[in-house]
């Protein structure tokens, strides 16, 4: 498999080899790698490969670099069934998915983003207008508010994994339909399994129903519940809190509890017994 991404990797390796051979020092190597860019003319994105070997993408219309993985480096011939995929394979499958009608109206699918070992995972509803354009979750006003909430507790957006219950934009931002949620479910199931976060924060009703069917967000928001070896905390969706001023302070207050929940979940996840994995399957 040879393409512009593998060629870019080769160029990066050539610089590393110059360092290994003593031609340049490590600081010069890292400075050179940080300046190298690969422009994706189709989407207008820019890519870079960090000195640690991680891919980052800056979507067209965005000014931030986020961890991502080029789909061009995934071998479609070796894709296993979803329950056995790794994160790049899930992203590849999602981008090519036609399981439900939402694929017909999407510009770009939005698999989710963040570190593969994130302690906290946020699960929202579905991509909106800006997300659909950039292929990233939570951009635009709701995304900015989410970043503010994270900063308020000493976190950066890059510290957490962010995904949605459906990966393609519902027309006019309508609610996802039950058949769409069902069709998309195993992608998210596998992401949760791979990332294995200590705490899952559900944002809005549809991700809350995944764990607490029929619950009322106004009654249980901010309350952590143990599910297997992790805590699940339902919260208001940032977009809803932007439109309903009375929910904004509640969401800020709920976020303040997150660091403590993470500590609690870390403590009990070290003593969890293997049977707790079965509990997860109940949801
Ligand atoms: S919403 Fe999910 S199931 Fe539907 S087409 Fe997109 S990725 Fe596939």
Image (cartoon, rainbow, N blue to C red):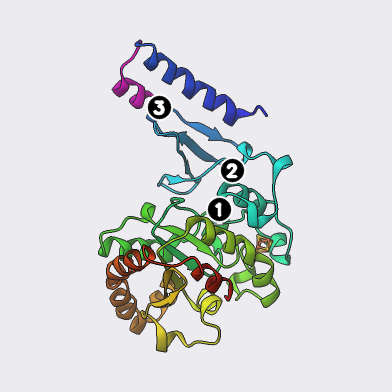
Residue in the foreground of this view, choosing between 58 and 264: 264
Q: CA distance from mark 1 to mark 3?
A: 25 Å
Q: Earlier in the sequence, mark 1 or mark 3?
A: 3
Most frequent secondary structure within the magenta stretch: helix
Labels 2, 1: front one: 1
| Residue at 64%, 57% in the rendered image | 83
Q: Quadrant of residue 231?
A: bottom left
Where does residue 181 sit, x and y in percent of width and height?
64, 71
Where does residue 264 sit, x and y in percent of width and height?
31, 69
| Residue at 32%, 62% in the rendered image | 150
Tell me, for residue 135, which label it has, or none: 1
| Label 3: which secondary element | helix
- Please report the bounds of the magenta region as a residue range: 23-32
Q: Earlier in the sequence, mark 2 or mark 1?
A: 2
| Residue at 47%, 18% in the rendered image | 14
Side of 203 where 185 appears, left or right: right
Where does residue 45 sit, x and y in percent of width and height?
52, 41
Labels 3, 2: front one: 3
| Label 1: which secondary element | loop
Q: Is residue 64 above or below residue 229?
A: above
Q: Would you name the residue on which mark 3 appears? A: 33
Q: Earlier in the sequence, mark 3 or mark 2?
A: 3
| Label 2: which secondary element | loop
């Amino acid at each position: 498999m040879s393409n512009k991404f593998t060629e870019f990797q080769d160029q990066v390796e050539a610089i590393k080899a110059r360092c290994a051979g003593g031609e340049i020092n490590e600081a010069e190597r890292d400075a050179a790698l940080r300046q190298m860019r690969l422009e994706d003319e189709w989407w207008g994105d820019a890519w870079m490969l960090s000195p640690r070997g991680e891919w980052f993408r800056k979507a067209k219309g965005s000014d931030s670099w986020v961890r991502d993985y080029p789909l061009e480096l995934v071998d479609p011939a070796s894709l296993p069934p979803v329950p056995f995929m790794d994160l790049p394979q899930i992203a590849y499958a999602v981008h090519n998915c036609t399981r439900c009608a939402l694929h017909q109206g999407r510009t770009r699918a939005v698999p989710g983003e963040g570190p593969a070992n994130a302690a906290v995972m946020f699960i929202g509803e579905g991509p909106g207008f800006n997300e659909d354009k950039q292929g990233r979750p939570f951009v635009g006003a709701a995304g900015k508010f989410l970043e503010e909430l994270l900063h308020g507790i000493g976190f950066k957006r890059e510290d957490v994994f962010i995904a949605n219950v459906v990966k393609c934009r519902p027309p006019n931002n309508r609610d996802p339909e039950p058949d769409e949620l069902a069709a998309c479910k195993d992608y998210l199931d596998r992401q949760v399994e791979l990332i294995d976060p200590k705490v899952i924060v559900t944002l809005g009703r549809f991700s809350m129903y995944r764990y607490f069917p029929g619950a009322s967000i106004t009654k249980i928001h901010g309350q952590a519940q143990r599910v297997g070896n992790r805590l699940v905390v339902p919260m208001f969706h940032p977009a809803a809190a932007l439109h309903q001023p009375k929910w904004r302070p509640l969401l800020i207050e709920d976020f303040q509890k997150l660091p403590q929940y993470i500590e609690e979940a870390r403590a009990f996840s070290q003593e969890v017994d293997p049977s707790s994995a079965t509990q997860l399957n109940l949801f």
